[in-house]
Each structure stands twice: as C-alpha cells, then as structure tokens.
Image: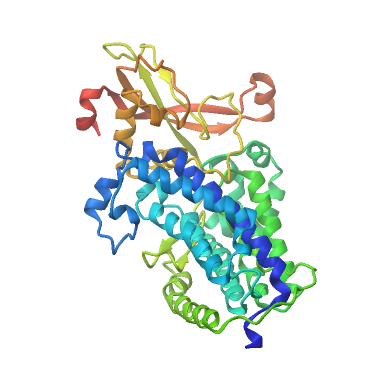
Amino acid sequence: MEWFTAPDYWLSRLVFQKALAAVYLVAFLTAALQFRALIGERGMLPVPRFTAAVPFREAPSLFHWRYSDRLFALCAWAGCAVSVALLAGLDSVLPLWGAMLLWLVPWALYLSVVNVGQTWYSFGWESLLLETGFLAVLLGNDEVAPPVVVLFLLRWLLFRVEFGAGLIKMRGDECWRRLTCLDHHHETQPMPGPLSWFFHHLPRPLHRAEVAANHVTQLVVPFLLFTPQPVATAAAALMIVTQLWLVLSGNFSWLNWITIVLALSAVRFPADAPSGPAAPLWYEIVVLAVSALLFGLSYRPVRNMLSSRQVMNRSFDPLHLVNTYGAFGSVSRVRYEVVIEGTADEVPREDSDWREYEFRGKPGDLRHWPRQFAPYHLRLDWLMWFAALSPAYAGSWFGALVERLLENDRATLKLLRRSPFPPDAPPLHIRARLFRYRYTTWRELRATGACWQRTYVREYLPPTRLAETGRRT
C-alpha cells in the first residue's frame, strides 16, 4: 500500500526517536536515584503494601509478581541502558521486528514503575511519556518509511496535549480569561527556576501578551497540525518555541521536553528520503490494527476534553495508552511553603535550637537562588508544594517523611539539599511550619541579596518525636 508510508518524514522520525530516548533516560535515572526513599521496601509508600491492596488488572506491573529494592534498581538501570542503546542507534541495525521489541522494553519497564508509583508518579507527564513511547513502538526503523497513520496519531496526541491544556485554562480560572495569571504564576509555580524571579518582574503588559500568545498556541495553532506542509511544520515550530519559553521560566520536569519531542514528529526536515523496500504485510496489519484500537480508546479522552466538567491528567485504561492532559487549570495567587525543622533538645520549646532542612528545588533559604533541574524530576519537592496547598495532599506520606527524618534515614536524606544534623546524631523532635513566600523587589534584592521574603502563617505539624509519629500522623 503506497499510501501507508511517508518517506519524506524519515529524518523527522529519527530526530523524534533520539529525543524520546533521551527523555526515557532522564525518567529512568530519576526512578533509579529516588525510589528507595519514596516507594522502596522501607519507603514512605512501599510498593509491597500497594501491590497487596491493588490487583494486577487495575495496575499492571511486573512488581505484582515480585518486588525487592534490588529488582526495582535492576529494572530502572536496565531502562537507562536501553535508552542509551536507543540513543546510540541500536534499533537501526536490528530487523524491523527486533527494533519494535526494543522500543517496547522501556515502555513496559516504565509502565511497571508508574503503575506502582502511587502519588509520587501521579503527574500527567508520566502518562504522556507512556503514550508517546507506545506510539514509538509502531514507528519502525530504517527498514521501512514512517507509517502515515502513526505520524497522525502523534499529531493527534500533541493536539490533545495542547488543546486540552488550553481548554482547562479557559474553564478553570478567570485570570486566564482576564490575561492576568502570569502576574502570579512565576512566583507561585511548583518549582521556580533560575530565571523565574526575572520573569515575575517583567512588565505587566508583557505578562498579558504572554497569556494571549499562550491561548493562541494552545487553542488555535493545534488545528494547523492537520493542514498540509509547510503550515504543519510552522505550527509545530511555534509550539516548540513556546515550550522553550516555558523551559526558561520554570522547572516542569520533562513536560515541556516531551511536548517538544511530539512537535518534532510533525516537522518535515529538508532532506532527501532514502529509498527502501515496501513495508511488510505483517507490519501493516499490526500498525493498522493497533491504530484502530487507539482511535477507539480516544473516545473517553475526547468526551472529557469537550465536557464542561473537564478534568486534567486522567488515564482511562491501566496501560496508559490514550489519556487526557492539562496543566494549571487554576493558578495560586499566594505561595505557601512547608518548612521542616528539627531540634536535639529533649524538651522542645519555641526558643529551642530549631534547625531547618533544605530541599533541592523548593524555596527554603531566602538567599538560595533556584537552580535548573528539569527535565530531571524532584518528586519530593513537587509533593511538598502540594502539601503546602492543603494537608490533604500529604496525608499518605508526610508522617512517614517525618519518621525517616527522625531516624536520619540515608535514602531520604539523599533527596534533600542539606540536613542540619550529623549522620550519627538525628534530631529528637521534628516540627513543620507554614510560611508565605514572595519574591523580593529589585530594591530588596540589592539591599539583602535575598530573592525571597517570607512571613510565618501557622503551625503545620507540632513538635513530634519518633515514638509519637504513628499517633501524630
């Protein structure tokens, strides 16, 4: 079938695959370096406890068969190795069926991680990576030209990501309709980046222009993805520029990067298409059958996207094959932070020697300038942002975090920037307090060198010692 393939997109496929392999590598590296404290055997939300309560059919994962920290580490580092192999082009030297199986490996491994990751893996970009990774299995390698239907599915996914995000903004918060959300967002976003302070202090008319441009990119430009070239390429390029702007303004894990990866698949790069054999019949049958399934599974995400009760970041099947997406349907006007402190005093008092724990990415020390971590994902720091919004977001894990800090648990301390206590002398009490944070002004920055100012709001967790953690939390 001559219509089945699009030879002009062979370079687009190559660029897309390399970029996706790089995102996979970051995702598996994040899992390998953080899992012990979060979901390990002694983690805050242990996998064995989860798999004992949730059946395999609801959350398919190889860890339903068996779990140990050693096995998880093996899977995570194996995912890193396969990602590196894909980056190096191993799939291009394999037969077509071998390349498809190779691309299936990181998808299956990461699905196993996400489906037992619980709240630590509840972010929309987890499902987005899985849905994109599954489509990559069908793209083939140098033995065949890229299938038209898979290229269309990639654009369809990009459309849902952008258009769904645009709709949730217009429906979710009036500041998006008034073009005022960026008066607050750069200050209150989950994890500011090194340039976020400067973005916040841009003139307000420029903030209005940013929001208006965002609406155009998310609500109008996605339709142009389905137009003939070069219009589709121009639409994808505009999306890439917008995502790079977001990369500069904050730390959003690999959300922006995986969106850029999807947009690259719609760009037709100027290059001579190599001649090659026609796609084998079995490959055409597999691609068309799976594509028909994915089109059918699109019904519920589309119904959600068009609903006035639209929800963000929902998976409608346990394999995360077709999902619904969205980001920042509402924007916080005020930034709150939970500050955790410990003391070695036997009897904790207000004037005790309370020492503050420092996190890697979330604001703490007023003089510590935010760093760029994305696309690497600091999961604990992100969840601490949600914990500041409401204790309900932290109910399942915050008590376990406090307990591990009281124990000076090595795996947990590795997630932090700094512990104020030596390894052999853990604190006797931990408390948490809620502060309101705001960016300093230009004058305050010059006078104090601090990029943040903070004001005490209330007690978040009263002084707690190890024997009390079960009762306090």
Check the image and tell me how it is coloured. Answer: rainbow
> Can you name the residue that lies furthest to the bottom here?
1
> Is residue 253 among the parts visible in the rendering?
no
> Is residue 46 among the parts visible in the rendering?
yes
Rendered position, 12 above or below 51: below
**Residue that appears at 42% across and 49% down:** 75
Residue 167 horizontal/vertical position (percent): 53, 65
Toward which corner of the image does residue 388 lie, by quadrant? top left
The C terminus sits in image quarter = top left
Closer-to-camera residue (72/126): 72
Query: Would you say 272 lies left or right of 343 here?
Result: right
Closer-to-camera residue (446/195): 195
Closer-to-camera residue (433/127): 127
Residue 441 horizontal/vertical position (percent): 65, 30
Toward which corner of the image does residue 110 lie, by quadrant? bottom left
Residue 339 horizontal/vertical position (percent): 42, 28
Rendered position, 328 above or below 267: above
The N terminus sits in image quarter = bottom right
Toward which corner of the image does residue 156 lie, by quadrant? bottom right
Rendered position, 96 above or below 284: above
Q: How many labels does the image show?
A: 0
**Residue that appears at 29% across and 54% down:** 64
Residue 403 horizontal/vertical position (percent): 29, 29
